[in-house]
Image (cartoon, grey):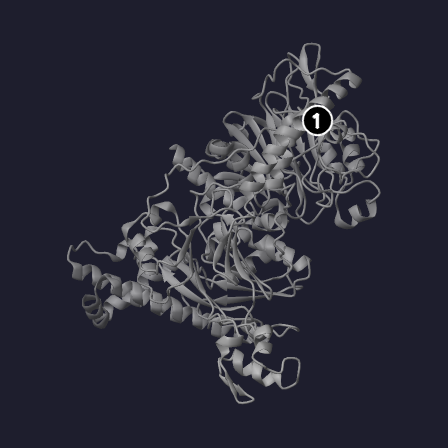
Amino acid sequence: MNTARLWQKPFALLFIQTKSITACRLAVACGSRFHRNVFQFCRTMTTNMEQNTKNFKKAKQKDTLRRLKTKDHRNSHGPSTVYLQVVGSGSRDNGASLYVFSEYNRYLFNCGEGTQRLMQEHKLKASRLDNIFLTRMNWDNIGGLSGMILTLKDIGVPECVLSGPPQLGNFINAIKVFSGALEDIKLSVRPYTEEAYTDETMSVHQVPVFGECWRPPSYLLSSRGSQLGVHLHVSIYTSMYIMCYILGLMSKATRDPSLVVAFVCKLHAKKGNFLVPQAIALGLPVGKPAIGPLVVDLKNGKTVTYEGKEIRPEQVCTPSDPGPVFLVVECPTVEFIDGICTNERLDPAALVVHMTPEVVLKTERYQEWMERFPSSTQHLVLNEQVQTVHNVRSLKIQTQLNMIHPEIFPQLKNINPKEEKGSLRVAPVRAECLLKFQLRPLLEWQRYTLTHSLTHSLTHSLTHSLTHSLTHSLTHSLTHSHLSLPPSLLHAHRYPEVIFLGTGSALPMKIRNVSGTLLNISAGQSILLDCGEGTFGQLCRHYGDGVDDALSNISTIFVSHMHADHHTGLLKLLYQRERAMATLGKPFSPVYLVAPIQIMTWLNQFHDHCEEILSHVNIIPNKFLCDGTEVPKYKTKSFIQAVLKKNDLDRFQTCHVHHCRNAFACSITHRSGWKLAFSGDTMPCEAFVGIGKNATLLIHEATLEDGLEEEAVEKRHSTTSQAIAMGMKMNAEFIMLNHFSQRYAKIPLFSPDFTDRVGISFDHMKVSMRAHTHTRTHARTHARTSARTHTRTHNSELLGTELLAYCPLLRKQKDGVSYIC
């Protein structure tokens, strides 16, 4: 129960009994805006109070908050080069994010899921990132923040300032549930109530924008129809709200969906450059000590006299640059339009970035606001109407693999916006990944880095160059291996099928995303095994416009342990699943979350301080699915039975494994007889051998290559040979290796143990388990990867015969049944 509601009624009665006449009169005099204004004042006042109580903790951070750093060889007159670049364009699979570059500083505006992966792929250096600005406390904007912070910590970034809503501090505390203490990086939260931020590049003013989505509880609105009656009760509630905050009697929850923070960014002025040839022509003592004071005065705009000759600044200096302004504005719903359009702090600017959905952008009021800016102002729109390729390297690899086997490696897809672009009176520029707007030295758009041009080049080269090479290679391989391709690709949608959404470890990279595996039991039943950051984006690229159907089919999610690369994609997937079910007209139902119970600490804190999430999950602690464990609660028992019934399962087992505390593996046994075992992260573990005995398919982590056993023990992972040995011990029919270290960019290294019962996984790889007896469904995987190599050739390009040497994914016929060799 929300404890805030427990306090509301007695305080409402208190104010009614004391007859809040003043509040009533103010309400009548000021109109309907009174309660909102007082509420906003209360919120700001409360934020200041909370900050004051924590001043003793933040005394050491004062210098960091002001961020007036002193570094050698920096121009004190502003940077020479500054540009803003689109990272995520705001599409459904990649939320809106911006990267701002100067030779002195790097900035990031919003950090949704996939931002880190895009920055790594497109060489936008995170190692220089020292400021992150967040417009709103919702997962679309902060979903990648935990992973980004961990990466900044690991690469040695000493400090980073987070600016935006005051709940950011609570969010940082919440992620420590799974990230640890974060002692190696100094994180400072700068809420919108703080003074303007200033560094060597620019000053940034935070502008709070409050929506009209706050409403008083229904029991405070009487049945009286008069406006006076409504104002009376709203005023009572407002006064009660203030008093509850002052006395600290409200719930600890600080979630505030009615707050968005806009950013007004002004570059520092840059003095003009001193023109040496012109100075020499005018007789100035260039190269002599006397020139120093003259240059200073001239660049400061003063006229000087030398040897009786008057010299004006414009004769020997380029014009100074007063410093352009750009705005970053998010208007998520129509409730925020008034707050933005009436805000006088959103000054005229050279560029306005609109993180605004099309339905808001098309409103008359918002278009009128856009028209108020000078005609020279450029407008950049980031929303779901944009269509751009973000992950070019992933597309390239998948296109190459698709040429080998289009069924196992389907082409990646795009999501087509359902809503048409609005006809706007002010024509904006639609965002594309890597689109640049240069702020200095010239104000101009730069499109030569756009990913769509890279994609076109990729498609052209693959179509015209690789096709002949691959055809020759396939023919050569078939001739020498006595294999034959079937006349057609049959059984493409046979179930169960496994789709690998993320096959890398630790952090998302351009080739492999972090852990996520989708098990499609039937056309309408799916289980997700782990859900690392970006899992939803991978689903979008795999299914395209069919992603809503895929999401709505997921009834159960298994999270193996609480490391960030295995669960930080969960929230995005849950929110998008709710949206998908609403779009399809299906009744909403929570997912069954089979996870370590510690995940609820994280979800509860996020629910309290950021967004509502608890209604999306029915938790089943992993430990209650271990053999011999008694399930203490009836509700948990009913959830377990529901999982078995909904997915037509005989058993869903888990066991503790040797990785971190509360790490689990699982095995899933279907009523038709097939069995899938999933290791999560682990060293070789006998308990897992027990629950995976005679598995049809084993998916086992193989983070490291053979020869790195000591490192594997230190990090509590498995090598390839150890993973294969586990499969042999449990008598698994087929073993798919997974969760490769990102040091192996494309193909991991293998040992002689790599037999025809072993395969390697790629992102977006689709394999299925096929029936081949009349009495029981035994499965063979769709992907027999017979890579036999002992040399370090993993850095070679996946082209032509080199790819075939690693994974000849070619089907042959045996006893009338199709297999993969």
Left or right? Give the position of 44 relative to 316.
left
Rendering quarter of residue 285: bottom right
Q: Write down the residue under mark 1.
A: 469
Rendering quarter of residue 687: top right
Q: Which SS class for mark 1?
A: helix
Residue at (63, 50) in percent of width and height: 120
Which quadrant, please, contains the C terminus? top right
Left or right? Give the position of 61 relative to 207.
right
x, y (%) of residue 460?
Answer: 59, 33
Q: Viewer-proximal residue, 536 or 83?
A: 83
Q: Viewer-proximal residue, 374 or 385?
A: 374
Tell me if I can see residue 212 in this picture.
no
Residue at (58, 85) in percent of width and height: 293
x, y (%) of residue 449?
Answer: 56, 48
x, y (%) of residue 182?
Answer: 64, 61
User: As displayed, is residue 20 above or below residue 351?
Assistant: below
x, y (%) of residue 35?
Answer: 28, 64
